[in-house]
């Protein structure tokens, strides 16, 4: 009798559909779409391997790092044993096979059609869901354990009712079919990983795997294969001019999902088409793929081609770049090197998760110790050329559109940065409209005035809500949405 038989008998008696074994975790019984932990002792990889080898037929070849599947019968109850390799060992699922679909004793090793829970086999592949996402012009696919798939379409998260909820183990199995081995190992070690996935000729996707209290989850964001042009995005002329700078620091900021990557891709593409330079991008992961046109383009992915943003940025100085794109300025050292790179005669583009131009400058300076902040202000005053703060809004009739706040570093703005008077930047932007400066409030009001977005949508995205309301009142716009918002509060 195998050591695990008594646990299996107890589970079958209590209506289990599967028993799940993973290194470092307690065994879990799955029943009725839920899982519960059993026993008091987590299993390590050698123990799981020993249990599997007790159950496996004598002729089975269980190689390390390879998936396996075989049949096992306990007191006449057929079970299916399936294993997936992890960085730390095997993840093993022992599934109860319904009597009507039990395979004969000599059945081949291939998995049977029966599943431990009807919902776990409903999704054929990740590609199947991504096809639907592209057909519906969605931006994100959300997959969470014990939930139906959801998609973000024109800003709204929508459930796909034709798919039942999916279990954690089945979701991980599906996700592992698209994850590189390096990312599988990283996920097993840290419960998070990021990478890019491509459907050739259709689109690329930025993928994040994570684990929460229910199990495995993932979000896959669409990155179009074709890079949108300035005209298609409707970018202001003030942004177009930044593509022709020879040196300096340009920051594109905004919350997650505001379209920063798309704006930067359009700027880099314009440089690629109109200049004869060397462009280096440092991203995590590589999103838009830029073929070399008039420029030579090298794209490096953190974790694949380099250890970190700061390492790649430091190395870029020895690679004769003209233009450097830093996907995220995450830490003090990366920010410091980016500013120095801009100071030494290179054009540097970077991103931050800030909402306004003035707050972007403060965020940069505040990352540094107090005794260095004066020096950083001096360096920023000399190197900063522009800040683009953007927000994405739902359009009337469907789709989304960006509102842009644009700060151009004129001598007056540079002096304010140097002197730490960022609270006066809004006034400087008000007087700089003639050279392309735009405040977010004005950009939002223009979208409403042109009937591109609803007043309510603009109000929700505004930072200075009272200033926007004053413009709405002066323009005689409908403010009935305020009553609804008050009722919801």
Image: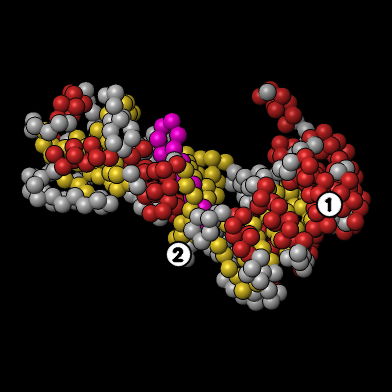
Q: Which residue is mark 2?
A: 200
Picture mark count: 2
Residue 196, given in percent of the width and then of the height, sits at: 49, 56
Q: Is residue 116 visible?
A: no
Which residue does the image show at 54% across and 44% down from the upper left? 152
Compared to residue 225, the image places residue 443 above or below, namely: above
In this orientation, which residue lies closer to the viewer: 51 or 144? 51
Binning the other alpha carbons within 10 Å of mark 2 as few (below 14), some (14 to 19) or many (20 upward) gives few
Bounds of the magenta segment: 204-216
Horizontal arrangement in the rendering, residue 310 relative to residue 172 (left or right) = right
Q: Secondary structure at mark 1?
A: helix
Binning the other alpha carbons within 10 Å of mark 1 as few (below 14), some (14 to 19) or many (20 upward) gives some
Residue 367, given in percent of the width and then of the height, sits at: 71, 43
Indicate yes or no whether the magenta region holds residue 214: yes
In this orientation, which residue lies closer to the viewer: 444 or 286? 286
Q: Quadrant of the C terminus?
A: top right
Magenta span: predominant SS is strand
Residue 61, given in percent of the width and then of the height, sits at: 15, 52
Residue 69, given in percent of the width and then of the height, sits at: 20, 47
On residue 452, the disc is none
Q: Which residue is mark 1?
A: 378
Which residue does the image show at 73% across and 64% down from the upper left? 347
Q: In this view, which residue lies farthest toward the front?
A: 371
């Amino acid at each position: 009798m195998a050591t695990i038989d008594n646990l299996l008998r107890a589970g079958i008696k209590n209506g289990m559909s599967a028993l799940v074994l993973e290194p470092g975790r307690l065994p879990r019984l799955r029943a009725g779409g839920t899982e519960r932990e059993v026993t008091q002792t987590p299993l390590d990889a050698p123990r799981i391997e020993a249990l599997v080898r007790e159950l496996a037929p004598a002729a089975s070849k269980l190689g390390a790092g390879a998936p396996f599947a075989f049949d096992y019968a306990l007191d006449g109850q057929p079970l299916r044993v399936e294993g997936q390799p992890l960085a730390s060992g095997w993840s093993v699922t022992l599934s109860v096979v319904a009597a009507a679909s039990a395979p004969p004793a000599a059945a081949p090793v291939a998995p049977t059609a029966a599943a431990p829970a009807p919902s776990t086999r409903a999704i054929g592949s990740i590609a199947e869901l991504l096809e639907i996402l592209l057909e519906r012009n969605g931006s994100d696919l959300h997959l969470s354990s014990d939930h139906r798939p959801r998609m973000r379409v024109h800003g709204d998260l929508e459930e796909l009712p034709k798919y039942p909820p999916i279990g954690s183990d089945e979701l991980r199995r599906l996700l592992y079919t698209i994850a590189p081995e390096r990312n599988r190992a990283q996920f097993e070690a840290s419960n998070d990983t990021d990478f890019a996935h491509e459907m050739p000729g259709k689109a690329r996707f930025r993928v994040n795997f994570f684990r929460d209290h229910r199990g495995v989850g993932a979000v896959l964001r669409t990155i179009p294969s074709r890079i949108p042009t300035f005209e298609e995005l409707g970018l202001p002329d003030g942004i177009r001019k930044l593509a022709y700078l020879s040196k300096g620091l340009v920051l594109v900021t905004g919350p997650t999902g505001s379209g920063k990557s798309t704006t930067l891709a359009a700027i880099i593409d314009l440089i690629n088409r109109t200049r004869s330079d060397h462009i280096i991008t440092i991203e995590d992961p590589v999103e838009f793929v830029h073929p070399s046109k008039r420029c030579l383009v090298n794209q490096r992915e953190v974790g694949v081609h380099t250890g970190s943003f700061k390492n790649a940025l430091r190395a870029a100085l020895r690679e004769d770049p003209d233009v450097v794109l830093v996907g995220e300025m995450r830490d003090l050292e990366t920010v410091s090197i980016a500013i120095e790179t801009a100071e030494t005669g290179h054009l540097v583009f970077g991103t931050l998760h800030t909402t306004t131009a003035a707050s972007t400058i403060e965020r940069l300076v505040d990352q540094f110790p107090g005794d260095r902040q004066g020096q950083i202000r001096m360096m920023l005053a000399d190197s900063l050329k522009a800040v683009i703060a953007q927000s994405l809004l739902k359009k009337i009739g469907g789709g989304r559109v960006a509102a842009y706040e644009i700060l151009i570093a004129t001598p007056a703005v540079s002096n304010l940065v140097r002197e730490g008077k960022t609270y006066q930047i809004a006034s400087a932007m008000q007087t700089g409209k003639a050279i392309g400066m735009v405040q977010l409030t004005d950009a939002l009001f223009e979208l409403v005035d042109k009937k591109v977005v609803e007043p309510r949508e603009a109000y929700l995205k505004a930072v200075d809500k009272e200033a926007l309301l004053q413009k709405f009142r002066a323009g005689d716009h409908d403010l009935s949405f305020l009553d609804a918002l008050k009722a919801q509060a």
